[in-house]
Amino acid sequence: MRLELGKIFIKDVQFGSETKIEDGVLYVNKEELIALIREDEHLKEVDVEIARPGESIRITPVKDVIEPRVKVEGPGGIFPGMISKVDTVGTGKTNALKGCAVVTTGKIVGFQEGIIDMTGPGAEYTPFSKLNNIVLICEPVDGLKPHDHERAVRFAGFKAAAYLGNAAKDITPDEVVAYETLPLLESVKAYPDLPRVAYVQMLQSQGLLHDTYVYGVDAKQILPTFIYPTEIMDGAIVSGNCVSACDKNTTYHHLNNPVVEDLFARHGKDLNFVGVVITNENVYLADKERSSNWTAKLVEYLGLDGVIISQEGFGNPDTDLIMNCKKIEQKGIKTVIITDEYAGRDGASQSLADADPLANATVTGGNANEVIELPPMDKVIGHIEVVNVIAGGSDGSLREDGSIVVEIQAITGATNELGFNKMSAKGY
């Protein structure tokens, strides 16, 4: 599969009479966008705000972050199985609006949602403070059940991102990058002397608002399977999660997965990036055993020399991570795992809920229990009172002056387990 990703760099977002892109500025027809989102009968109120880098703005509770994109050429459309028909994506041409994102907020869906500060110390922990954000405030109708609430907000974000992305359909990109993965046998022939490496991406799928979708299918319903990396880059995997904000893989993370990007950058040079195996994270032991067995079997079938495994979430999924790592290592295939840590506020506790001597090559996104004080902001988009109940916060986290004391667990993307952050650690 070959995908040409056209990058259109957005330096500012403004409201205007027409949704369009001119000279690097994205103009948004606010009324038209609100009308589109209000089509969902589950939402009683919708508003749109803009939050730019450096502005004294706090967004909370954050549900998802999505990069606007549009399919320009090739099969399928953006977010297949969600708002586009089910068709295989990952080939042709797609344009992406770089430097901006859709952020969804409103009444809290689940307690594991987050904070994005556009300035101050909190802004240093989240990549989304560097973007021009179009923020959707989606308020549900009274009495809406949580899973219906989550779905309404999820689809609102996707529809907004597709609507904005469509403004780039006929624009010549500022930069075009091509990504290509050959069929396995052709790939081995093309790079016979390079080590064969694949990426095992664990998808959060524990239910109870802990869901990820693959071509519209809840990942808890899948068995581990092969996928082309360009399918991920083209919107085949999206977030439906209300998990801890620090290590949630938002839809933006999936579209811009740095593991995929970095493996492509080294492909054909010092390794042969043969593809991706996606697997789920399960609740019950039998399901964990089944999925990890299948994952190890698939990577063995590919004849790999090495595997990178990334996790999403913590605690229960730590067992899935270690099972995948151990079983793949036992087949003689080297692994590197990417995770984060919940080592207590003093950093002295066990970092993961599970461990094994074979998991001896680890990249960490940092300790999510680290405490930070966030100063008050001039403006809050969303509902500030939720910081007392979201994961990482506690009763009294919100002070009278508007400042907040929380664990960085509450900051969206702070310890992301794809490595999409600034934090890590070195072991000695």
Image (cartoon, helix red, strand yellow):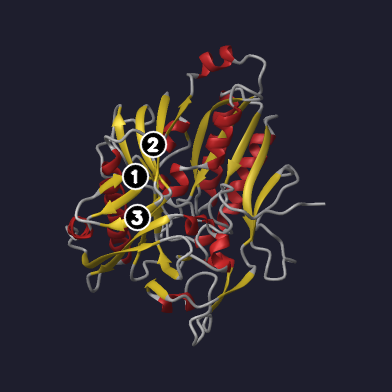
Q: Position of residue 418 (x, y in %)?
A: 56, 47
* Residue that carries the numbered disc 2 in the rendered image: 234
Q: CA distance from mark 2 to mark 1?
A: 25 Å
Q: Is residue 421 left or right of residue 90?
A: right
Q: Is residue 79 above or below residue 416?
A: above
Characterize the local packing of mark 3: few (<14), some (14-19) or many (20 or more) Cα atoms within 10 angstroms. many
Residue with the most extreme bottom position: 400
Q: Is residue 1 left or right of residue 124?
A: left
Q: Amino acid at mark 3?
A: Val
Q: Position of residue 417 (x, y in %)?
A: 57, 50
Residue with the most extreme right position: 428
**Front-lying residue, 95 or 425:** 95
Can residue 297 be seen at all in this image of the molecule?
no
Q: Residue at x 62, y 51 (%)?
A: 339
Q: Residue at x 48, y 81 (%)?
A: 402
Q: Is residue 74 above or below residue 49?
A: above
For label 1, the SS is loop
* Residue that carries the numbered disc 1 in the rendered image: 23
Q: CA distance from mark 3 to mark 2?
A: 23 Å
Q: Is residue 341 above or below residue 277?
A: below
Q: CA distance from mark 3 to mark 1?
A: 11 Å
Q: Amino acid at mark 2?
A: Asp
Q: Along the polypeptide, which appears first: circle 3 or circle 1?
A: 3
Q: Along the polypeptide, which appears first: circle 3 or circle 2?
A: 3
For label 2, the SS is loop
**Front-lying residue, 281 or 272:** 272
* Residue that carries the numbered disc 3 in the rendered image: 13
Q: Position of residue 343 (x, y in %)?
A: 68, 64
